[in-house]
Structures are given as structure tokens and as C-alpha cells.
Image (cartoon, rainbow, N blue to C red):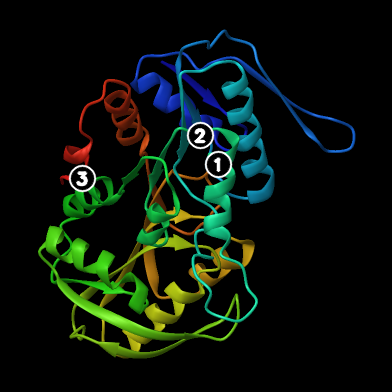
Amino acid sequence: MRIFSGNAHRALAEEIAAYVEQPLGDVNITRFPDGEIGVKIVDNIRGQDVFIVQPTCNPPNENLMELLIMVDAARRASAARITAVMPFYGYARQDRKDQPRVPITAKLVANLLVAAGTSRLLAMDFHAQQVQGFFDIPVDHLFAAPVIVKHIRAKQLPDLVVVAPDPGGLKMAYAYSKMLGAGLAIVAKQRQSATEVEALNLVGDVAGRNALLVDDLCTTAGTLCAAANLLKARGTKQVFAAVTHAVLADQAIARLKNSPIEFMVTTNSVPAKNWNGFPVEALSVADLLGEAILRIHSNQSVTSLFNV
């Protein structure tokens, strides 16, 4: 087994390598003067089981292209199997045609990964579950819930209700509510633009209770902050947030600081941001991903990794 890392999130790759007790493989990634990416895998990987750790976070196009070129290099170096380890799968929000003349980019990315030579995908908390069906290769889809729920339980937040900030997050919120033994509520929203969201209504009893907003992805924080404002207007005592992928734009941090959200729990699936004083607890998913890599390599089941 050999583990390699692109430039997207080397710190996480080093944590994963430490967990599986393997050194990171030696790969040279360079840029030509015109911006093209050059890759040379220094180590001999002929007949090896290769894992390439690369979330396609910001900048997504650079990181995706880097991953594709690394996969192609490994394939041409006669690796026996190539597993793309993508803690964050970019472009997953573009998973359907909801308007005329728009692409399904999540499927395009899947096609590119397979065409490059990816044998298997290891990912965590897709934005939409159906992305698994875009691949004709095996996909191991992990959830950050075991890591996040354990942390939330330790806080012993009283009288808790788990809230989905939009209808698409209801299934995730329901799973968290069952694991935490908490109530469940849902916010109905209308997206006005890519950065602006209007929270319209709330279903569920939140008055006098503590609310935990759960979501898989936060980029502009518009959805979370609109939901938090609505919860406060409906009598919620305290509002917290738990997000798997904190892929935050600059405006998001300013919004969070001005929102009723008291703290956010997230993971290190993407590199850490400068939170500018906003209270954030970033949990490591390196052990979760490392254990999955060990089990994939030894052809064991990964089902038990879903247990809390």
C-alpha cells in the first residue's frame, strides 16, 4: 500500500499516513511557466495499492486537475489499484438539471475520475446521496456523523432539537436527532441567488429549546444564518451548528459572527480557515479515513465505521 497527497490538504494526508503507519509517498508536483501542472511519482509503485488524498476544495479546478493528473501518472506507472480519497467532493451541488441548459457537473467529474484511471473512490458526506450512482466503479461513502455526534454528546447540551436548515438536509437531521436522542425540526427556505437565502417557515417545536443546525456543506453561510435568525425569532434559547465541510468564502465568516450561532463544530475535511474570532471546533477525520483505507486495502467491511 502507498499513500500520496496532492497540494489540496497535505496536513490531513500526513495524519492519515500516521494512522495507517505508512510514510507519505514521494511525488513532485510542479507548475510550468504557463500554469500547467506537472507530476512525477518518484517512488516505484508497480503492482502497488495506491491511495491519493485530495479534496477538491478551493481552488476546485486546480485541485481536481491535480488529482486527475496524479491518477493518470499512477495508472501509467502500473499501479495495481488506484483509490481516489476525496474527503470533500467538489461540484457535488450540481447534481441535477433544475433549469434548462445547465450541466450536471457532479456526473462530469465522476466521468473524468474514471477516465483518468481511478479504480475506486473513498469520499465523505456527499452533498447528495445520488452522486454515488454517477460512478460505475466501487464507491465507499463515509459519514462524519460518528465523529461529530461523539463530540456533541460530550457537551451534554440540554433540551436539544436538531434542525435541518433546508428540506434537502432533512434526512441528515433525522439521523442526527436519532443518534442524539433529540427533537427534530426543519426550515423551509427560498434561495434568491448563489449568495442570498430567505428562510420562510419553520416546522417543529423549538420554543425554549436549544437548537443544533446540521448540514453537510457551508460556503456562504447564507442558509445557516437565515435559519438561525428564524429560530431565534421563534423563541429558541441557543443556536449551534454542525457542518461537515466548512468550505467558507470570506463573506461567510462575517455572516457567522453577526448571526445568533454561538459556535460551530466542523471537520478537517478541507484546510482550516482564519475564523477571525468566531468560535469553531474542527474535529479530525483522519482516523476515520485511515481506518477505511486499511479495510479497503485488506478487503474488509467498512460498515462498522458508520456506527456511533
Q: Nearer the viewer, mark 2 or mark 3?
A: 2
Pick whichever, 184 or 109, lies toward us: 109
Residue reaching furthest to the left: 181
Pick whichever, 120 or 236, lies toward us: 120
Q: Mark 1 near mark 2, Cβ–Cβ under 8 Å?
A: yes
Q: Quadrant of residue 20?
A: top left
Determine the residue positioned at 19% across, 78% down: 209
Marks 2 and 3, how far apart at CA? 24 Å
Up-down relation of residue 84 to residue 200 (above or below): above
Neighbor class of circle 1 (other Cα within 10 Å; few <14, some 14-19, many 20+) is many
Up-down relation of residue 290 to residue 273 (above or below): above
Q: Position of residue 212 (x, y in %)?
A: 27, 68
Neighbor class of circle 3 (other Cα within 10 Å; few <14, some 14-19, many 20+) is some
Q: Position of residue 296 (x, y in %)?
A: 31, 28
Q: Answer left or right for 33 relative to 272.
A: right
Q: Quadrant of residue 35?
A: top right
Is residue 276 visible in this depiction of the protein? Answer: no
Type of the residue with mark 3: Phe
Marks 3 and 1, how far apart at CA? 25 Å
Quadrant showing the N terminus: top left
User: Which mark is first along the chain, 1 or 3?
Assistant: 1
User: Which mark is first along the chain, 3 or 2?
Assistant: 2
Report the residue marked by disc 1: 113
Report the residue marked by disc 3: 306
Up-down relation of residue 193 to residue 299 (above or below): below
Type of the residue with mark 1: Leu
Label 1: which secondary element: helix
Type of the residue with mark 2: Thr
Determine the residue positioned at 33% across, 83% down: 187
